[in-house]
Structures are given as structure tokens and as C-alpha cells.
Amino acid sequence: MLKEVQIQALKAGQSPGQLTPASKKSFPTHIRVLNYSKDQCSEVADASINEALKPIPEGITRWIHIEGFKELEVFSSLQERFKIHPLTSEDILNSMQRPKTEEFENYVFVTLKVLSYKKTQHNFRIGQVSMILGENFVLTFSDRPVNIFTGIRKKLQDNPNQRLRGQKADYLFYRLIDTIIDQYFVILEGVGEKIDKVETLIIDNPIRTHTKLLYQLKRKTLTLRKAVWPIREAVNHLSEVNEKFIGQFTRTYLRDVYDHVVQAIDTIETYRDMLSSMLDVYLSSITNHLNEIMKTLTVISTIFIPITFIASLYGMNFINMPELKWKYGYEYACILMLTSIVMMVVYFKRKKWF
């Protein structure tokens, strides 16, 4: 949250639509161009900007994927070639942009959060992918290298009978969004496994270090919620855009994507409730543990009260105390103390105090 505020503060006073990368540590710009139709598919893995700007032949769909925002000249050229609004370019370069959908005269713009999971560390990283859909082209932008679209590229290249090859650009656009959303469930599965482990630790042994894990999970869940929640509105907006960009065939599939987003949001909300309940369980366990300790100490102190009384009574140095000169006075005092202990223990047992 603080990082987002800092980035917005750096932009204060700049002209709207100015091409400024969000980070000084931008990755080198890498362009990949893929042209396909039902009968053919060709890819240039390390393309130049001139390759991306070539006229698109009739019946061909072009997918241009750009990673790294270091070379701003590339964005200027694409902005001029595909008539991209300057505010759209600004949103693409802003890696902290809130997920949204916007419709313009010549294209539809969508920006989404991409999640990558590190299973060994039980952690995830949030990136951003922006997409522009035109009548016969799709542009995708990522501020750093991503491998999430590798499967789609292989399907386009290796299988000419794929439905993907026979459809228009809007169907590719849908498949890219669907791939991003499906990755959320991989992250949610990993977070759910971590929550189960922490829950077991808290129930079995509620110690302070476990609260640190609990608060870390709550923070991750809030981060997930912030990344996923706006996508519901963004995907829903796609069903309302002009049919020249998204046809009825693809809208049916987009409704399925919307259902997946709602399911992911419901899962995140469930995790939030579970974590809140786990915190209550932890606090209750700590309180119960403290009560057990206090109960034990109280019982021990209560048992020693009559013993202390007897010892203090016969510790007084009065001359006329009958038991002081009695031959069995010591044994009598010991038996009296032992008897009081037994009576107290029996009484506590009957009361079920321990």
C-alpha cells in the first residue's frame, strides 16, 4: 500500500498520459510477435519494433507480447500505429494500476494482476499484465518476464485443429484472461494448505511465534483480495463492450470466467473468516492455558494454607503451650499437617477442581 502511494506521489505534477516507467529498475524490453490463422502460424521470438508494426494481412490475427518497459520508444511507436490513447499507455506503464476494463473507439483495454506461486517458500508474487484487443490484433504487456502464456503459444504453434486457431482475436483475448484467472486457484490452494498447517500448530501448541505466521497469512489474504476483487467488475464490463470487439460466441466463455472470479473471491473471503476465527482460537487457547496455570497455583497455595497455620501456631514461643514439652508433640504436628493435606486433596477431587 505504501509503495503505491509513493509511486503516485512521484507522478504528482506530471502531464496526463506521459510515458514514464513506474520503476527505475525496469527490465529490458523484449518483443514477441505471433501471426496465426486457421491454416498457418508463425512466431518471431525476439522481434524488432518494425516487425510488430507491419500491416496485418487479411485473415491473420496478430498477437504482440511485450515484456519490460525500459525502452519507451517502443510504446510511442505502438501508440501511434494502433491509435492507443495516451492514458492507456500511462496505465500500462503503471505497475500498480487497479484492475479495470476500458472501451475506446479502436480497442478494448484490460489490465489484470498476475500471481506466481513459490511452493518451496509458501509465498507468491503479484505482477501485472495489460491487454489491448483490436479487431484483428491482441497486445499484451508485462513489466517483467512471465511464463504464464507459454501453453497458449504452444497450442497455437503445434495444433492446427485447436479452436483457438479458428477463432478471431477476441477468443485469444478470452483465453489469455482465463489463463490468468486459473492461476489464482493454484495460489489459493497453496495459501489454503498453509492456513491448515498454521491452524494445527495453533490448536496443538499456541505460542507467540505462531501468531507471527497468522498475521503474515492475514496480510497475504488481504493482498490477494485487493488484487482479485476489482477483476470481478473488469470481467463483467467485458460483456457490455461493442460486438465488433467481442462477439456472442466469446461472450459465453467470458461468463464462465466471471463465475471463476466470483469463486476465487468467495474462497478468499472464506480464508479471511478462517484466519479471524483462528486468531480468536489462539487468544482463547492462551487464556485457557493461563487459567490452568493459575488454577494449579491456587490449588497448591490452598493446600499449604493449613500447613502454614499449624507451623506458625506451634512456632510461637509461649511457655504454657501443652504440646511443647510433650514427648510425641513433633509427630502429632506432622500427622496433623499430613491429615490436612489429605482432606484438602479429597475435597478438591470431589469438587473436580483438578
Image (tube, rainbow, N blue to C red):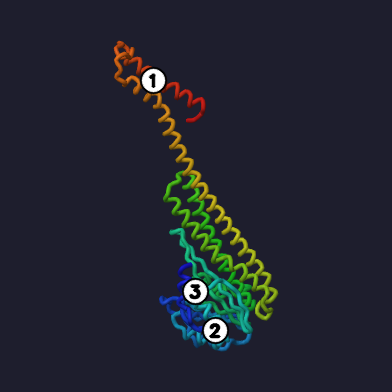
**Horizontal and vertical percent position of residue 3:** 46, 70
Q: Which mark is residue 82?
A: none
Residue under the image location 55 percent in, 52 percent down: 274
Could you give the CA–CA distance between mark 1 and mark 3, rounded to whole angstroms?
77 Å
- Choose top left, top right, bottom left or bottom right for residue 229: bottom right
Residue wearing tag 2:
86
Helix, strand or loop status at disc 2: helix
In the image, taking residue 30 as reference, residue 230 lies left or right, namely right
Residue in the foreground of this view, choosing between 88 and 239: 88
Residue 95 numbered mark, or none: 3
For the residue marked with disc 3, what is the amino acid?
A: Ser
- 147 vs 42, nearest the viewer: 147
In percent of width and height, residue 230 lies at 58, 68
Hey, which quadrant is residue 108 in on the image?
A: bottom right
| SS label for mark 1 | helix
> Of tags 2 and 1, which is closer to the observer?
1
Q: Label 1: how many residues lie within 10 Å, few (<14), some (14-19) or many (20+)?
A: some
Q: Mark 1 or mark 3, which is nearer to you?
A: 1
Front residue of 118 and 216? 216
Amino acid carrying mark 2 in the image:
Pro
Image position of 232 (left or right of 200): right
Tell me the CA gap for discs 2 and 1.
Answer: 91 Å
User: Which of marks 3 and 2 precedes in the sequence?
Assistant: 2
The reply to whether residue 338 is in sight is: yes
Q: Secondary structure at mark 3?
A: loop
Q: Amino acid at mark 1?
A: Leu
Residue highlighted by disc 1: 338
List x then y, in percent, for residue 44.
Answer: 50, 81
Give neighbour class at mark 3: few <14, some 14-19, many 20+ (Cα, 10 Å).
many
Whichever of callouts 2 and 1 sits on the residue coming sooner in the sequence is: 2
